[in-house]
Image: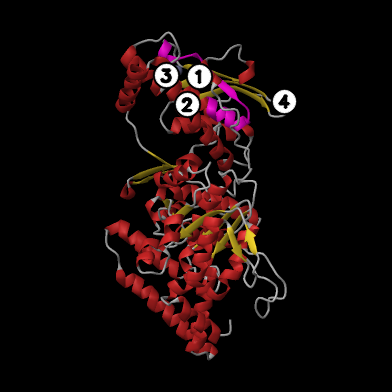
Amino acid sequence: MVKGMAMKQLPGYADLTKRLRFSPEQGRIWRDSERCVLLSQSALTTLRSQLVAQLGLARARRLFWDMGFAEGARCAVEAKELRPDRGFLEAFAVGPQAHALTGFGWTEIETLDSDSASGHFHGSFVVHDSIEAAVHLATDGVSADPVCWLQTGFASGFASSFAGQPIVMREIECQGMGDGACLLHARPEAEWPELDDVEKSVPPLMLANSQADRHEFVPGVSAGYHAVRNMIERAAGTDASLLFLGETGVGKEVFAKMAHRASLRKGAPFVALNCAAIPEGLIEAELFGVAKGAYTGAVASRPGRFELAHGGTLFLDEISMLSPLAQSKVLRVIQEGEFERVGDTRTTRVDVRLLAASNIDLETAMEAGHFRADLFFRLATLPIQVPPLRQRREDIPGLMEHFRAKYAQRHRRKVAGFTTRSINALLMHEYPGNVRELERMVERAVLLVNDGEAIDLRHLFLGSDRACIRVGLALTNDGRVSGAEVGGEKAQSIGHLLGLLRQNGEGLKAVESMIIKAALEAARGNVAQAARDLGLTRRQLASRLEKIGR
Ligand SMILES: [Zn+2]
């Protein structure tokens, strides 16, 4: 049991204030991984009195309480991440400290007595200078009931999420009722003699401890992200084909998986195929399977992706890369649910929901005659545009944390977050490679950073990437790009390469094969992507690969 623990004995605010960042160049303020706005007391007063006037007191209170609750629950997740190895009280203090940092008033923890094994949770908190009380007193005078709705909602949301069980915090005294300060008592939901309607609305499952599916789920808070999620949810109960459009690396496969998990087919397989990663001649075998003896080397029959996805979902990425013949076969499966394995005369029937993605404009491809119009219209029932990462920068902080946690666990590394300058650089970066580029940068940084240290610029930006970040930073400082600096970097790299060549006595061919291999690696074996990066057609790259014996 902790008694009489004043906030001054608790950790300082450094770890919390460090996460508060102002980026006026982008018109954004960040608190942790979330974008925020500054709201003046007069704006809050207008909002509150208008809502009370239009909705009535009870509904306005519920609205503020729910809003506070959601914010508190989020804050508890951050508390666990921010002070994972500190004691219970230090980690819990993130709630009242965040409340103070955002300007709602400051808290003394009078008593806090909790036992997670038995579910015991009793606390008593004094909040001074509540802004909500001030707003209420200024407009309506002294109230008969407590008035700090956001505050009690926040406290209840934070405590519930933190403790992993429904905890209700209630104001026993309130400044808005003429008391000197607000006194909040915390009890498990069941221990209050009776709850009012608002307090009863504590969601049953608010667990900050829950690790389930965390690494599978890719977070997002931006309007663009939510627009995509809304489209997916709207189609959740149907078998409609979805067509995801957007640049390479925006996470189209992640969203396709999300659509599968939200669908009635979620218990059945999700099978993905990147059409650009398969050589043109093999794509039909890959999709529809092969009968034994269909061609030299087909020593046994094997099923294709359509059969593997039976009952579930098949996701075809870069669908524009399909040959005309493969396109017509795919169309037949969508329309009639049947096909033949390559070299087989027997017809196979499947029940598959098809999701597709493309990073080129399919309509243009259709007009140019490269893509079948009937297939396009079948797929494009519900086209979903996934915006590039640079157009939804508010998703960056959450993604950074997500990938840091994911790869720290996978590679068994201890990583103490990010340095301030690396956070700023990541927020400013242009991300031509989108989410995938950010993920690769963070994974590499997790591998490079010393155990227990924070990720810094040098772990994130290696070689050519450094030129990109300089451009980004130079732009914000004086509004101009220093071309000489970038050119200088390029000249330096070429000079370095020439030095290596002289040393090893290797020729231009060796350099070419090195660059091709590096491009393939960067594109994770995706030949079409590597070709685009190198400014070649896929056919040109394939013939070069053949020459260098790959
Ligand atoms: Zn109050």
Residue bounds of the magenta highlight: 156-177
Disc 2 marks a residue whose amino acid type is: Asp
Looking at marks 2 and 1 on the same chain, the residue that comes earlier in the sequence is marked by 2
Looking at marks 3 and 2 on the same chain, the residue that comes earlier in the sequence is marked by 3
Looking at marks 1 and 4 on the same chain, the residue that comes earlier in the sequence is marked by 4
Is 257 or 364 nearer to us in this picture? 364
Residue that badge 3 annotates: 59
Report the mark closest to the observer, 3 or 2: 3
Whether the residue carrying mark 4 lies under 8 Å from ligand 1 is answered with no
Disc 4 marks a residue whose amino acid type is: Ser
Residue that badge 2 annotates: 66
- Is 164 in the magenta? yes
Looking at marks 2 and 4 on the same chain, the residue that comes earlier in the sequence is marked by 2
- Point 36% across, 60% down: residue: 472
> Position of 349 compared to 390: left or right?
right
Q: On the rendering, which quadrant does ligand 1 occupy?
A: top left
Tag 1, which secondary structure?
helix
Residue that badge 1 annotates: 198
